[in-house]
Image (tube, coloured by chain):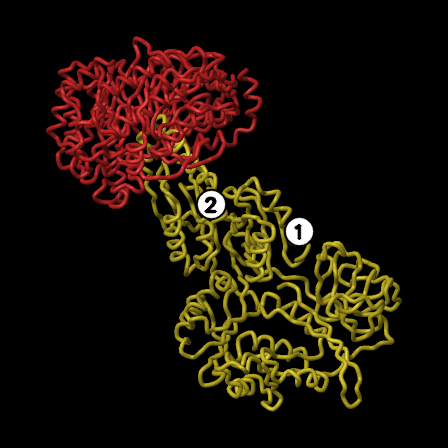
Chain colours: A yellow, B red
């Protein structure tokens, strides 16, 4: 998931010259959320194996990863895998590779990892077609930090590629990004387990253990050099700090579990430095955290790990993207939490911007109509439209990130029966007509339920939210009004009438225990509710809201 | 102790228990287990294996000291004064002075009933020679005799024959039971002896015989005054029998009697409900019980109907029925003294008040539940398990009262739940003596908004309503007794109608009640 599995193949072969090659294989995550990590891994490589499924052909991720490799000037070896499958059509895939990427059909390797067919050609092709690493072994040390993870016993373990010079055990090293210095306590290669070598030469990929406490110190893409080096070291290009594209509030389902959640998040971020965490207080949900993620998958994985590895029960608020608001006095506000945006600002809003993405979608042509409908509902702007072959269509769209964040992929999958593939890359901010939509229960705004939406959709979203809430909130002793409002203007309203009767008509000696159990159950139900003013809101209400676009 | 599912006796009072409620399946502390069997088979088995023996041979007195747990003390039995709420007398020993007797026989099972009953067949109006009844009453007497107790039991102040249909049992057998009770515990001269009676199961002679035995309160299971409704809920009697039964009770001069009605039956209209209430008032009983039909799983109604859906009345209609009963009966000078009970002045059911005050009580017979020493104990509801239980009791293998360790939180929960069902409400002074002031303050705080909304009423020492229009929190410590909250109760009818909601809110407060060990000390 977060950590690339790096296998060091020490591949001795009996070729003509029978030399030994040290090959490093890095498996990259395919998902867009981690495209920065992918780009850093690619920066440590000289070539790539572009693996395509023989039955499915070119997918959106194939396109994205091809261009990443292509732009990094890497040698590309196309591999068509799964040729053993009955539905495999390698010739068609070859044609797609030719038309999309101008890859020569004769260069394509055909393999079946399952049966082993064709695999013998892969490593010779790697040695033949991919050049050895460049780099100056006589110049001073420069290493690219390409990955890191946290080991409970040994601390942070960094994966590095030595670009120039050499690193010996015991050397003092510094980070260009943080300026901190460390000692290389243990170094070696992955073979595939950590194998100490005491030295890493130019071009080698290996690990360094240097006593870092947290992966936050190990910035991916960072340049590491000798602390003592006298010349100014020029950092390697391409380093970027993590950019958080999706934010959501995380609250303990039971308010008293805040400390436990705090602890779980602390531990988890030890291992995943790319999450930003800040404390947040909500009137409805109490104390919690506002977390920033690289993308949607990253957020999902983080939530799941919290629940599965730490047993934390959480309520997550609707994910939001960072908007920028500009006010008439010239001030700008980056909004990561809709609740933080004033509903009735003192200053007039001059403009607001939202982040967009460039989405790549590949799908069978029969779904084009419904996908285009979906994309225009999501305020998409078409950039490119072409046929990969007679049956598959390739499209590029500019989409507001917000529209992608909420349930887009699920909907895409369902309208295309799962045949569409989708990928996206971050793009610019664009100006947009955005409004803050508040949800009010009995006139009281529920901060954890407010969202920022495009004006054109605000009525529909408001109506949908109100209807959903009406379904999940039970009748209570008082009448409850549910309203959606923009500023002070109510745009949708529903009423839940008061409960008329909830009485156990009979309660005698033998019934006491049973009646009591019934009421205990009712009490437990109330405990799981979040109280907003006088209204008990079930946790499902918050989960349901996640699904409204 | 092991937890098992068991049937709780329904000791209800003035009603024919089959009615709405039904079985109470509940988890209870219980020390006995036995194989399952159907009611029918147990009866057969009894017939063939039971050797008659004389009930008076059985007693094996094994005096047992009841532990004097603090909390238990606070609920010690007191004089059966109806006006008294959870009695907190500091008696060192708690002796139950109430006994519930379960007589499970019915002619047939009503469609709403999931109680522990034994259906004898619709033709069975004469039961004096039915071996199922004879054997059962013998086991019942053996159970009474095998019960361990204090050396000096207090004489019983209330006895309640519930069922089933107790009026199906011949007076001679009822006499056996009463004699056994009298010998074992003593029976106060002024004891209230109630019996649930169904129309069509007794005549003038039987009623008189019962009265001669000491039965002085009758709870008549009328349920409805419409032939159609009686039929559709599977009652074994028709409207004619209802009128006959009322005539018999009145002609015999039973002074204290109750009519039991069920509201929200399928196809019941508000006209029908109004008619039932009117005819009830015309019959001039001293007590009326009004139950709301509850649809229980496993009953015929449970299979046929969904609550709130046609032909059952909607929640709104059903709430209107409840309000209608409250209004019409109160206008006819009945006091609405408990969620489902109404009576003329001074005719509260003393036996039921034992339950609502959380005072101890004995219970004997199939599936019945007793409360002794703070422990609720449910007897097996299968006949063969029950007979084994009685044998074990005789052999000293089981004890149906508790030894110790009654959780004060549990007790507080029971007291709140039971007393808020009554019009008298929760007596805060006594509650504070037992559980400390922090809990009382939390409850006051909890219910304040509901006082404003009209669901809860705070009362002072003289039971005058206190208005809480100011923000001060010293309602409990107010020196001016007119401003000090002495009782809290649910309002009639709005608070009663939402009693589950309101009481479960209090459960939440008791649940998060942290300092109860200190409250315990306070109680000493």
The image position of residue A68, as x and y in percent, is 63, 76
- Looking at the image, residue B298 sits to the left or right of residue A152; the answer is left
Specify the subunit that label 1 lies on: A
**Mark 1 falls on what kind of element?**
helix
Task: Report crowding for label 2: few under 14, some 14 to 19, many 20 or more residues within 10 A (C-alpha).
Answer: some
The image position of residue B458, as x and y in percent, is 39, 21
Asked if residue B49 is positioned above or below residue B80 in the image, the reply reads below
In this view of the protein, which residue sits in the foreground, A11 or A210? A11
**Residue found at x 70% / y 69%:** A6
In this view of the protein, which residue sits in the foreground, A98 or A177? A98
Query: Disc 1 or 2, which lies upstream in sequence?
Result: 1
Asked if residue B177 is positioned above or below residue A152 in the image, the reply reads above
The image position of residue A471, as x and y in percent, is 37, 49
**Total residue callouts:** 2
Q: Which mark is residue A446?
A: 2
**Residue found at x 53% / y 62%:** A354
Q: Which mark is residue B51?
A: none
Task: Report crowding for label 1: few under 14, some 14 to 19, many 20 or more residues within 10 A (C-alpha).
Answer: some
Report the residue that reaches farthest toward the top: B189
Q: Using the rendered image of the protein, determine whether residue A52 is visible from the camera's viewpoint.
A: yes
**Residue found at x 47% / y 12%:** B91
**Mark 2 falls on what kind of element?**
loop
Q: Which mark is residue A267?
A: 1
């Amino acid at each position: 998931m977060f950590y690339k599995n790096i296998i060091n193949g020490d591949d001795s072969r009996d070729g003509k010259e029978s030399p030994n090659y040290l090959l490093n294989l890095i498996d990259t995550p395919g998902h867009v959320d981690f495209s920065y990590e992918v780009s850093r891994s690619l920066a440590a490589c000289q070539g790539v194996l572009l693996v395509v499924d023989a039955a499915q052909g070119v997918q959106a991720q194939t396109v994205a990863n091809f261009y990443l490799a292509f732009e990094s000037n890497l040698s590309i070896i196309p591999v068509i895998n799964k040729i053993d499958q009955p539905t495999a059509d390698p010739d068609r895939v070859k044609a797609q590779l030719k038309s999309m990427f101008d890859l020569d059909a004769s260069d394509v390797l055909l393999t079946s990892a399952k049966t082993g067919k064709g695999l013998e050609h892969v490593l010779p092709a790697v040695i033949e077609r991919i050049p050895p690493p460049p780099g100056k072994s006589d110049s001073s040390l420069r290493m690219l930090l390409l990955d890191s993870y946290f080991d409970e016993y040994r601390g942070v373990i960094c994966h590095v590629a030595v670009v120039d010079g050499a690193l010996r055990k015991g050397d003092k090293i510094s980070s260009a990004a943080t300026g901190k210095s460390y000692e290389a306590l243990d170094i070696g290669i992955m073979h595939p387990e950590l194998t100490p070598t005491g030295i890493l030469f130019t071009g080698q990929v290996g690990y360094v253990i240097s006593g870092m406490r947290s992966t936050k110190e190990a910035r991916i893409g960072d340049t590491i050099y000798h602390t003592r080096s006298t010349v100014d070291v020029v950092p390697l290009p391409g380093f970027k700090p993590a950019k958080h594209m999706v934010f959501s509030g995380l609250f303990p389902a039971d308010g008293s579990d805040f400390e436990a959640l705090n602890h779980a998040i602390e531990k988890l971020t030890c291992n995943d430095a790319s999450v930003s965490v800040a404390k947040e207080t909500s009137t409805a949900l109490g104390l919690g955290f506002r977390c920033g993620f690289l993308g949607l998958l990253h957020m999902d994985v983080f939530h799941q790990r919290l629940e599965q590895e730490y047993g934390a029960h959480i309520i997550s608020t609707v994910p939001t993207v960072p908007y920028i608001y500009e006010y008439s006095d010239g001030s700008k506000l980056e909004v990561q939490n809709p609740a933080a945006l004033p509903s009735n600002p003192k200053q007039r809003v001059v403009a607001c911007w939202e982040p967009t993405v460039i989405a790549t979608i590949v799908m069978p042509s029969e779904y084009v109509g419904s996908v285009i409908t979906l994309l225009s509902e999501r305020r998409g702007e078409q950039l490119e439209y072409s046929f990969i072959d007679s049956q598959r269509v390739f499209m590029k769209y500019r989409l507001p990130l917000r529209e992608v964040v909420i349930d887009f992929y699920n909907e895409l999958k369902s309208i295309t029966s799962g045949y569409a593939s989708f990928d996206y890359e971050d793009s610019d901010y664009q100006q947009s007509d955005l409004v803050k939509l508040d949800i009010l229960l009995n006139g009281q705004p529920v901060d954890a339920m407010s969202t920022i939406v495009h004006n054109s959709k605000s009525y529909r979203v408001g109506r949908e939210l109100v209807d959903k809430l009406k379904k999940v909130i039970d009748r209570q002793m008082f009448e409850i009004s549910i309203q959606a409002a923009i500023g002070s203007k109510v745009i949708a309203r529903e009423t839940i009438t008061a409960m008329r009767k909830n009485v156990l008509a009979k309660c005698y000696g033998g019934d006491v225990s049973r009646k009591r159990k019934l009421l205990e159950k009712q009490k437990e139900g109330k405990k799981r509710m979040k109280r907003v003013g006088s209204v008990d809101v079930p946790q499902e209400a918050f989960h349901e809201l996640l699904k409204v676009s | 102790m092991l937890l098992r599912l068991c049937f709780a006796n329904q000791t209800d009072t003035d009603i024919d228990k089959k009615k709405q409620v039904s079985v109470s399946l509940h988890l209870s502390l219980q020390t006995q287990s036995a194989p399952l069997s159907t009611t029918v088979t147990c009866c057969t088995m009894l017939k063939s294996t039971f050797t008659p023996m004389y009930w008076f041979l059985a007693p094996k007195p094994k005096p047992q000291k009841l532990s004097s747990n603090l909390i238990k003390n606070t609920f010690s039995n007191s004089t059966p004064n109806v006006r008294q709420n959870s009695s907190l007398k500091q008696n060192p020993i708690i002796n139950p002075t109430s006994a519930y007797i379960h007589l499970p026989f019915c002619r047939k099972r009503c469609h709403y009933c999931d109680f522990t009953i034994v259906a004898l067949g619709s033709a069975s109006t004469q039961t004096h020679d039915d071996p199922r009844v004879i054997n059962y009453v013998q086991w019942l007497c053996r159970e009474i005799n095998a019960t361990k107790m204090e050396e000096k039991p207090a004489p019983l102040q209330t006895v309640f024959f519930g069922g089933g249909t107790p009026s199906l049992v011949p007076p001679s057998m009822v006499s056996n039971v009463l004699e056994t009770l009298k010998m074992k515990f003593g029976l106060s001269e002024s004891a209230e002896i109630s019996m649930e009676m169904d129309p069509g199961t007794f005549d003038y002679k039987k009623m008189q015989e019962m009265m001669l035995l000491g039965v002085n309160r009758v709870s008549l299971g009328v349920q409805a005054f419409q032939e159609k409704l009686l039929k559709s809920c599977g009652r074994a009697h028709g409207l004619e029998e209802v009128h006959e039964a009322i005539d018999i009770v009145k002609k015999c001069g039973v002074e204290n009697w109750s009519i039991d009605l069920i509201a929200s039956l399928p196809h019941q209209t508000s006209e029908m409900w109004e008619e039932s209430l009117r005819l009830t008032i015309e019959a001039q009983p001293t007590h009326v019980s009004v139950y709301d039909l509850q649809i229980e799983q496993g009953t015929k109604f449970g299979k046929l109907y969904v609550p709130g859906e046609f032909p059952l009345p909607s929640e709104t209609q059903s709430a209107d029925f409840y309000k209608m009963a409250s209004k019409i009966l109160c206008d006819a000078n009945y006091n609405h003294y408990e969620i489902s009970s109404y009576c003329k002045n001074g005719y509260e059911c003393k036996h039921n008040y034992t339950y609502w005050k959380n005072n101890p009580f004995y219970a004997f017979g199939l599936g019945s539940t007793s409360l002794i020493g703070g422990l609720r104990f449910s007897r097996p509801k299968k006949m063969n398990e029950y007979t084994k239980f009685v044998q074990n009791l005789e052999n000293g293998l089981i004890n149906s009262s508790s030894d110790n360790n009654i959780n004060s939180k549990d007790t507080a929960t029971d007291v709140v739940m039971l007393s808020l069902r009554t019009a008298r409400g929760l007596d805060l002074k006594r509650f504070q003596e037992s559980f400390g002031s922090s809990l009382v303050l939390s409850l006051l705080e909890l219910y304040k908004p509901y006082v404003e909304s009209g669901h809860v009423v705070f009362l002072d020492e003289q039971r005058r309503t206190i208005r809480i229009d100011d923000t001060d929190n010293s309602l409990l410590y107010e020196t001016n007794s007119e401003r000090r909250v002495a009782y809290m109760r649910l309002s009639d009818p709005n608070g009663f109608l939402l009693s589950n909601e309101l009481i479960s809110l209090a459960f939440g407060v008791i649940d998060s009640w942290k300092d109860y060990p200190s409250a315990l000390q306070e109680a000493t």
